[in-house]
Image (tube, rainbow, N blue to C red):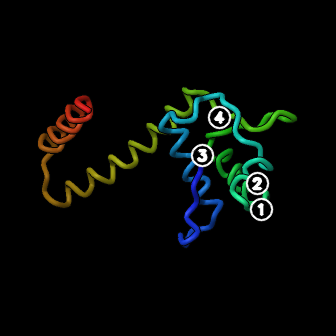
Amino acid sequence: MLFLDYQDRRPIYEQIVEKFRMLILSGAVEPSSKMPSVRQLAVELSINPNTIQRAYMELEQQGLICPVKGKGSFVTDSSRIRQIGMEETLSELKKITEKGMALGVGEEEMIGVIRLCYKEGNND
C-alpha cells in the first residue's frame, strides 16, 4: 500500500503522512474505513511503531483520521474530507492566481484557463 523513499531527506513519518493524505483525499482510501494498525503497518514497512504513531497523530491533527478507543483509527467522514480537499485546493488556487497577477494575466484570461482545465479534465 505504501512505498517509502529512504533516499528522501524528509523524515519517514512525514512521508507516511503525505502518502496517506494523498490516498485519503483522492478517495483511494474510503471514508470511515479502518486504517492499518500501528503494529501491522510498522511490520509491513519494517520501521519503528513510534514512527507510525507519530504519523497517525499528525493525520489526526489534520482531521483526516480519528481514533476509536479499543478499535483503532478510522478515516473521517466524506464531508470532512471534501472540506479539507477544498481548503487545500483554494490555497493552491490563490497561489496560482497571485503568480498569474504578477505575470500580468487578467482576470478573464485566468477564468478562461480554469474553464479550459475543467473541459480537459472532463475529457479524460
For label 2, the residue is: 43
Q: Which mark is residue 75?
A: 4
For label 2, the SS is: helix
For label 3, the residue is: 1
How many other residues sit within 10 Å of disc 3, few (<14), some (14-19) or many (≥20)? few
Task: Please report whichever mark, 1 or 2, sits nearer to the chain's N-terminal start.
Answer: 2
Q: Which mark is residue 48?
A: 1
Amino acid type indicated by mark 1? Asn
Residue in view at x 44 percent, y 37 percent: 86
How many other residues sit within 10 Å of disc 1, few (<14), some (14-19) or many (≥20)? few
Of circles 1 and 4, the one toward us is 1
Task: Please report whichever mark, 3 or 1, sits nearer to the chain's N-terminal start.
Answer: 3
For label 3, the SS is: loop
How many other residues sit within 10 Å of disc 4, few (<14), some (14-19) or many (≥20)? many
Expressed as whole percent of the image width and height from the top left, the position of residue 35 reads 69, 38
Residue in view at x 79 percent, y 37 percent: 72
Amino acid type indicated by mark 4? Val
Q: Quadrant of the C terminus?
A: top left
Amino acid type indicated by mark 3? Met
How many other residues sit within 10 Å of disc 2, few (<14), some (14-19) or many (≥20)? few
**Left or right: residue 84 compared with residue 11:** left
